[in-house]
Image (tube, helix red, strand yellow):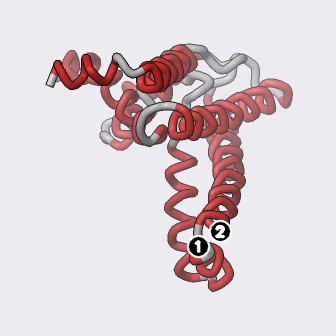
Amino acid sequence: MFNKLRDALKIKEIRVKLLFTLLMIIIIRIGCQLPVPGVDPNYFRDWFNKQTSDAFNFLDAFTGGSFLNMSLLALNITPYITSSIIMQLLTIAIPALEEMQKEGGEGRKKIASITRYVTVALALIESAAMTISFGQGGLLREYNALNIITAIVALTSGSAFVMWIGERITEKGIGNGISIILLVNIIARIPQDMQGL
């Protein structure tokens, strides 16, 4: 196995793709640590610890801990996954989308473009709901329009950025970018999960 890996690394194209993928993963992990401007991270951590259900632990695992940190990438890739599922269901229900899918590569590109727009719309809705509901409870240091708008834009942009990186990994890196991001986020939570156990 190691011989095959060593032989693969001798090929420049594979080395470049591997390094690109690694660089994108590092960028995502850094983004998971950058807090949203105007947010009190201690409030969210305290609120999170008071919850008795494991639903938020599951969400935090998908986001690689950025949900708990209330970082710029707190929504992470979840809006994209949701929009992909929605689009797959809509291609069955809406004949025009079904025709697009049958067109081949060009149709899939159109559906992928629509999926991106749906992702941004979902991220906007999720970030607005999260900011407004938690903001009233003390998530924002000052609950005013500027801080609300800043948090919404930051969270929505973070989600769109992760989606973009996932697509770049798929295009220029190794493997499916969205799957790699999910894998890295789940692996990043393993030390905290082991400590919790």
Quadrant into which the N terminus falls: top left
- Residue 127, given in percent of the width and then of the height, sits at 66, 40
For residue 94, which quarter of the picture? Answer: bottom right
Disc 1 crowd, CA 10 A, few/some/many (<14, 14-19, 20+): some
Disc 2 vs disc 1: Cβ atoms closer than 8 Å? yes
Q: Residue at x 73, y 34 (%)?
A: 152
- Identify whether 82 is placed above or below 111: above
Look at the image and tell me whether residue 45 can be seen: no
Q: Residue 101, labelled with which disc?
A: 1
Q: CA distance from mark 2 to mark 1?
A: 5 Å
The secondary structure type at the circle numbered 2 is helix
Say left or right for 134 vs 5.
right
- Identify whether 113 is placed above or below 4: below
- Residue 126, given in percent of the width and then of the height, sits at 63, 45
Q: Residue at x 25, y 17 (%)?
A: 6
Three-letter code for the amino acid on which mark 1 is drawn: Gln
Look at the image and tell me whether residue 58 can be seen: yes
Q: Residue at x 48, y 38 (%)?
A: 177
